[in-house]
Amino acid sequence: MTCKYLGVCGGCTEVSLESKTAQASLLLNLSNFEVFSSQNSGFRARAEIGIYHLENKIHFAMRRLNPTSKKESRFVLIENCPNLLPNIQQILFILKDLLNTTEFYNFTIRLFSLEILSSQTNAILLTLIYHRNLTESWKKEAENLCQKLQLALNLEIHLIGRSKGVKWVVGKDYLTESLRILDKTYLYRYFEGAFTQPNPLINAQMITWILRHLEDSKTQDLLEMYCGCGNFTIPLAQKFRKVLATEISKTSIQAAQFATQINQISNIHFVRLSGEECMEALNNVRKFHRLREIPLDSFCFSAALIDPPRAGLGAEICHFLQRFQTIIYISCNPVSLKKDLEILTQTHTILHTAFFDQFPHTHHLESGVILKSKF
């Protein structure tokens, strides 16, 4: 793995997938599991890149890893990141050249960082973040930059400018993504700033793995917590009579509702609830106005799908999930997964496990576990 750089950013190590899976399987006490590898480069659909101003020029930068503390310590300049999708790498080269022309000198004043989101359909959303107020003049310059980028790259480009309390949009503040799952295409809306899966090919493999290990349950229902934009929800809806999917982010719920419409799926109810609120609603502890049009009593849940943050679920939610016959757990942290499985396996047996290499060249490893009730 090589890249052009002016320093070592620390984002990559040469840790092998074999060593990662060996370590995770030992931690989780697993002997039977599937492994899904990623392509070695050009796999990442989103990135956060710092902007460094030096000698009247801007440079792209990433955090450097402190080898002693293992923490990010300072920026180092980079020229390319081969982990990014090819269209992102393309636009970075052209973008830096344009931003370093006199035409865009004012545009780059106090430009602090750049966030990039790409779809597999060659659309790119660029968010430029500033430490200064942005006015209408910024938008005019951004429209000019957007035109030049589209002309140079023949890509669909959208630009967003952000500063404290201000958001300017040139084009759209979202992308439409396309995922191919088991010979069927699903469409999603990815909003700027909302969580999306970073590795599209591994994402498709994760969804496919779940579908292949789930039996049809057309008389039973699915509860999904932490559903995001409906990434798993939309394809899995075909397996169940109805789905109740919860998520705390308003933006993600909006994207998920769009996905049901464009994919013509009618058996999903998306509702904005945190994990704790979802438990309170289903345990009849609290009434929520957000649920006024959703007849909770009509659901007959047999399965639960959770894809929590790195901290995992915690004891309260794990005990709540023990009522479900089937639990599908997607984890981005084997350590928190281990703690949660210590509770879940009191009532459930692990049927299937898989490891997904979302971030090659790092210690990160995504896990999938499907559990079945012992009772």
Image: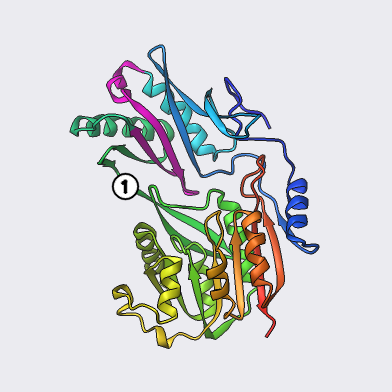
Q: Residues in magenta? A: 101-129
Front one among 373 and 228: 373
Residue at 72%, 36% in the rendered image: 14
Q: Residue furthest top?
A: 55
Label 1 residue SS: loop
Q: Is residue 315 above or below residue 286?
A: above
Q: Is residue 355 magenta?
A: no
Residue at 62%, 57% in the rendered image: 336
Pointer 1: what residue? 172
Residue 94 % position (x, y): 44, 27
Q: Is residue 95 above or below residue 248?
A: above
Res 11 → quadrant: top right
Residue at 40%, 32% in the rendered image: 113
> For the residue marked with disc 1, what is the amino acid?
Lys
Residue 110 % position (x, y): 32, 25
Where the N terminus falls, by quadrant? top right
What kind of colouring is applied to the model shown? Answer: rainbow
Instruction: Judge left or right: residue 319 versus residue 30.
Output: left
Where the C terminus falls, by quadrant? bottom right
Q: Residues within 10 Å of mark 1 (few under 14, many from 20)?
A: few
